[in-house]
Amino acid sequence: MTGPAVVGLCSGTHDSAAALIVDGRLVGLVEEERLNGIKHTKAYPQQSIDWLLDTAGMRASDITDVAYNFAPVRYLTGALPVRHLRPGTAGRVWPRARSFALVHRRASNRLRQFGRHFPQARLHGVEHHRAHGLYAFAASPFDSAAVLVVDGLGETTTTSICAARRTRQGLALVGRWSLPDPASLGYAYGAVTEHLGWRRGDEEGTVMALAALGDPGRFRDLFTQAIPLTGEAFVLNHALFPLRVISSRYPRLTDSFIAATCPPRRPGEALAQVHCDLAAALQERTEQVMIHLAVQAQHRTGERALCLGGGVALNCVSTGKIVERAGYDEVFVPPAPGDCGTAAGAALSVAQSRTPAPVAGVEGQCYLGPSYDGLDLRATPRPGMRAHRPAKPAHHLAARLAEGQIVGVFRGPLEAGPRALGNRSILASPLRPDVVHRLNTQVKFREPFRPFAPVVRESSAGDYFTLGQAAPYMSFASGVTTLARQQIPAIVHNNGLARVQILTPEQNPFLDAVLRAFQEITGVPVLINTSLNIKGKPICGTPDHALDCLAESGIDALLLEDWWVTET
């Protein structure tokens, strides 16, 4: 080792993750949930760190720097009460100040505790939106771009815009503009998600899917009042979204909002049209705000390419609308736009400060976690299961999919981010009328209105999808062509869109081979691609997790590192 060895950490909040940069190269980025089996875990990512160190042939004492994905001191700005001492917010001023001060203490203590694990390391707190922005741009193919980060809260910032450049000294983020809390699109979306009976910070995607069943007109005026646009960005109306206090004891919606919409829906309660309409109005306003912010980013930077980061960038309908309407040549969302990606972003920030030079291994990379090449299974890996090795795994898999089987795939390095991109996927034929129903009711055990995403070979993408740009990480909801509606209606949601992964042979040669073989059999180069997990559990990160999924779900088979595993 000749240069710094930097561990980047996301820990103690949600989506714990670790990244490692050694000698100017990213070794890996791993989400702890994939290894400990606890979805959105906030636990210290010990298993992820252990794998990274083992992969690099290092010990904890070899680490020179630890980069935390928050800068604790920046929370103190939120503890200043003066700017909120006015009618409508004054009642929450002191609880808010105390909550930000408490988070500052906890984050400071957490950073100090990291030092106990790495005795030789310097400790660094990295501003949260800087970590988001650096990772979003580093993973992109652009030499320069506008960077727009939109999330719930990063210290006291909720939205940021800057220009980014690649230089000989590394990545440069310049001319940053920031929007402070309490104007937070992530806060608003999470509040309504919770009101509709789903978990805030987890199931916003369910609300986005539900929106396709609703009429946004019913609550359009309400959301125009609730989230007004400004010349630069937007604000939240505190008569409807009260001032944030970082505590679950303080509601995120006012009585006025509830009176104007509906009572809170309990988890599992039957859905009514009012719930669909509320989701539709929220989603429509989110799209309008995101397009407005993207346009502002172009005005501020003059750039023709856009990188998106932050949790709100996971709203693929909004990102698809940005592609259509914001006027960019190309839009990019990294594979891990949420907080797990900030582990890599924080490490990037510190690595560049220690050795001003580009960091390799980030651009265009998504398969950044553990792999289990050479796995040797017994003929009966578990009681009631049998395994064998097909001579041609890709062709065998494609043939079974064409017959209507639903198959889990666990092969190669683990993906970073929340989307399964072929290495930890459940694949199915989009040509079978019953497949979506089977996937929802017998495999994923989730709401019947939720759609399933397609993966298509790049050479055929224009035949089925209207997106007109790259989509390697399933980040955009695209319009579909007449051919898609005729041949593969199973992948078209009620809003006429599909969250597509456009695959190049270089990105995933095995999945490309499966798509080619499936096309040879059926004439269609498209498959349904959903994550290898069941509801409430993370994407499978270990072979044992994958075998659990086979045992506990309704998939017909599992391709586990070229072993074909079925239940007897």
Image (cartoon, rainbow, N blue to C red):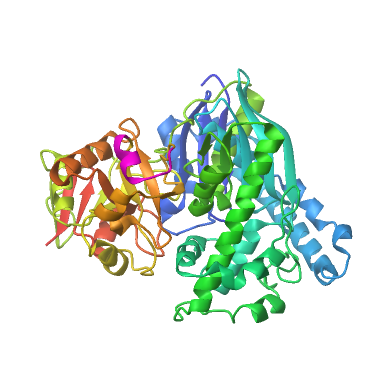
In the rendering, at what x and y percent does residue 346 appear?
61, 38
Tally of numbered tags: 0
Between 486 and 396, which is closer to the camera in this rendering? 486
99 on left or right of 379 = right
**Magenta highlight on residue 466:** yes
386 on left or right of 251 = left
Where does the magenta region start and end? 459-468
Q: Give me the residue at 67% from left, 72% from top.
A: 253
In the rendering, at what x and y percent does residue 19 appear?
51, 38
Q: Quadrant of residue 123?
A: top right
Q: Give me the residue at 64% from left, 57% from top.
A: 185
Q: Give me the residue at 56% from left, 71% from top.
A: 278
Between 482 and 148, which is closer to the camera in this rendering? 482
In the rendering, at what x and y percent does residue 158 appear?
68, 51
465 on left or right of 375 = right
In the rendering, at what x and y percent does residue 336 appear?
49, 44
Q: Give me the residue at 15% from left, 40% from top.
A: 520
Between 143 and 39, which is closer to the camera in this rendering? 143
Residue 8 can be seen in this image: no
- Magenta span: chief secondary structure: helix
Residue 6 can be seen in this image: yes
